[in-house]
Image: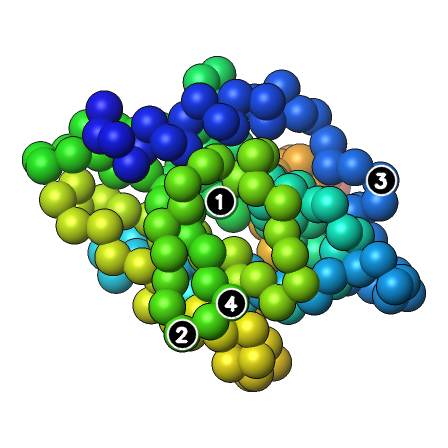
Amino acid sequence: MSARLWRLVAPTFVVASVGAMPHALAHASTRSATSDDVRIAVVIDFGARSGVSPRIVIKCLRVPGGTNGSDVLASVASSWHVPAPTYATSGLLCSINGYPSTGCGTPVPGGYAYWSYWHGGGQHWAYADVGPAEWTVRNGDVEGWRYQDSGAANPAPAASPDLVAACAAAATSPAPAPAHDASTAGSATLFAAALLVAVVLGGAGAITWRRRMRT
């Protein structure tokens, strides 16, 4: 395992067993600001080969002081109504917004496919030295995530690391589509199927009744 990837594994072990975000973050984007809040941005870049649209999504929000990067990511997912981040038992982040749907730190030629973690807030992105559970966000920070699928290269998110620029882009960039509710879709499909069967049986019954009337 590469040194960069390892940095994101051990420090994030604590988040592997987290079932829900802290209550204080559940409505971070809508609650009233307090003097202890910090203003940050989150940039998520799915990578050029992901096929995800939009490829880059950005969220500006206020969170309580002392919040760590993992909780920020979970709060963003909740505000967008998309799947929560998933983690391996090692603590390695496996998916953001449900991407990728399978695999976690999968070996690829030249390295591994994984979510790289970055810090902005100025003119340049800096690769994270610790995992998100060990990082406390500060006022003006830009949290960056980019999916690395080539192995050899580890480019930073293809968006500005500056808070003002990131928030300006967030105001005009589309949010990810909400997660499809599989249970609702399943119920709708069953209802449609039942309705179709009823129509078919009803039609067959009507035909049979007319035939009997003729005889």
Q: Amino acid at mark 1?
A: Ile
- Which secondary structure lies at badge 1? loop
Query: Disc 2 versus disc 4: distance between alpha carbons?
Result: 7 Å
Comes first in the chain, label 4 or label 1: 1
Q: Residue at x 27, y 47 (%)?
A: 148
Query: Disc 3 versus disc 4: distance between alpha carbons?
Result: 26 Å
**Residue 18 higher or lower than 148, as above or below:** above
Comes first in the chain, label 3 or label 4: 3
Of the residues tagged 3 and 4, which is closer to the observer?
4
Residue under pointer 4: 121
Badge 3 density bin: few <14, some 14–19, many ≥20, Cα 10 Å:
few
Look at the numbered discs 4 and 1 and tell me whether their residues touch, using CB distance below 8 Å: no
> What x and y, as percent, mark residue 105?
31, 29
**Residue 65 higher or lower than 184, as above or below:** below
- Which secondary structure lies at badge 4? loop
Residue under pointer 2: 123
Query: Disc 4 versus disc 1: distance between alpha carbons?
Result: 21 Å
Q: Residue at x 44, y 22 (%)?
A: 10
> What x and y, as percent, mark residue 210?
69, 44
> What x and y, as percent, mark residue 130?
45, 37
Comes first in the chain, label 2 or label 3: 3
Of the residues tagged 2 and 3, which is closer to the observer?
2
Look at the numbered discs 2 and 1 and tell me whether their residues touch, using CB distance below 8 Å: no
Query: Disc 2 versus disc 1: distance between alpha carbons?
Result: 25 Å
Residue under pointer 1: 96
Q: Amino acid at mark 2?
A: Gln
- Which secondary structure lies at badge 3? helix
- Specify the quadrant of the image occupied by residue 134: top right
Query: Disc 2 versus disc 3: distance between alpha carbons?
Result: 33 Å
Q: Residue lying furthest left in this view?
A: 109
Q: Is residue 85 visible?
A: no
Residue under pointer 3: 23
